[in-house]
Amino acid sequence: MKKGYFITFEGAEGSGKSTQIRNAVAFLEKKGRSVVMLREPGGTRISEAIRAILLDKNLKEMTHVTELLLYLAARAQIVREKILPALKKGKVVICDRFEDSTRAYQGFGRRIPLSSIEQVNCLVRDSLRPDLTFVLDIDIAKGLARGGRHDRIEREALSFHERVRHGFLSLAKKEPKRMVVLDTSKSAESVSQKVRERLERVFGQ
Ligand code: TMP
């Protein structure tokens, strides 16, 4: 049985997730919560090794299905090795990206049917679902300019990244209770303020 609380941060490239995650962790720790911070793909030895393959800019021949299965393999490992054990101990787990990224990048971006992704997803994450997800929305050109275009995914065409952004927004429309969209054209501090307000609703003043 899960006792903890699972929060994910999602968004297109350069949306400022790292800053917002750091601020959220500091806020929750100040409230006395024990927080585990993870990233996807990654967070375990095996998942970090898979991450290196996924982001290698030289592996241009990778097929879309191979890419999907590697993201899911990395997730199958972190879910069982890190996320579920931490939640069982009552910790707050904050993950930089999770399965909404797969829906947005491999579903909307690569155009793999969402129904196919969901079939494998069930096996990967079992009954685990994020309790709360922040989607940091960013203008694609600005985000790519901020983050650079170094790895295999960042080097994709602008139109791919536009589909990813649209993907996140339409996923959020379908699940407004879980997914909170934040406009990052505002200052980082005002975005943090919105995150804190939402966390206060869950964890108390
Ligand atoms: P990061 O640079 O934010 O750590 O994420 C790594 C890249 O992997 C980023 O371009 C988004 C992409 N990604 C997917 O395409 N599918 C996924 O399921 C995940 C978790 C990330």
Image (spheres, helix red, strand yellow):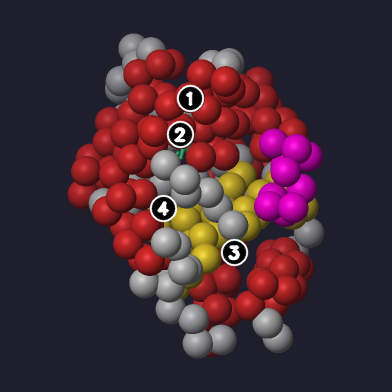
Q: Position of residue 202 (x, y in %)?
A: 67, 72
Q: Is mark 2 within 8 Å of ligand 1?
A: no
Task: Give the CA distance from mark 4 to mark 3.
Answer: 13 Å
What amino acid is found at the position of numbered circle 2 in the picture? Cys
**Residue assigned mark 1:** 119
Q: Secondary structure at mark 3?
A: helix
Which residue is most to the front?
A: 1
Mark pair 4, 1: CA separation: 23 Å
Kindly identify which numbered label has been placed on residue 20: 3
- Between discs 2 and 3, the one toward the N terminus: 3
Q: Amino acid at mark 3?
A: Gln
The residues bearing labels 3 and 1 have C-alpha atoms spaced at a distance of 31 Å
Asked whether mark 4 and ligand 1 are closer than 8 Å, the reply comes as yes
Give the class, few, some or many, for how many residues have Cα within 10 Å of label 1's Cα (few <14, many ≥20).
few
At 51% from the left and 73% from the top, the residue drawn is 25
The numbered disc on residue 39 is 4
| Residue at image coords 52%, 27% | 118
Name the side, left or right, on which 130 lies relative to 95.
right
**Residue 115 sits inside the magenta stretch:** no
Q: Quadrant of residue 113?
A: top right
Instruction: Identify whether 37 is placed above or below 67.
Output: below
Check disc 2 and report the residue beneath it: 122
The reply to whether dot 1 and dot 2 touch (C-beta < 8 Å) is yes
Q: Position of residue 142 (x, y in %)?
A: 68, 42
Callout 4 touching callout 3 (CB < 8 Å): no
Query: Counting residues from the N terminus, which is met first, the one under dot 2 or under dot 4?
Result: 4
Front position among marks 4 and 1: 1
Residue 194 at what x, y percent from top left? 75, 67
* Of residues 73 and 147, the one drawn nearer to the viewer in this rendering: 73
Whole-angstrom CA distance, mark 2 to mark 4, is: 20 Å
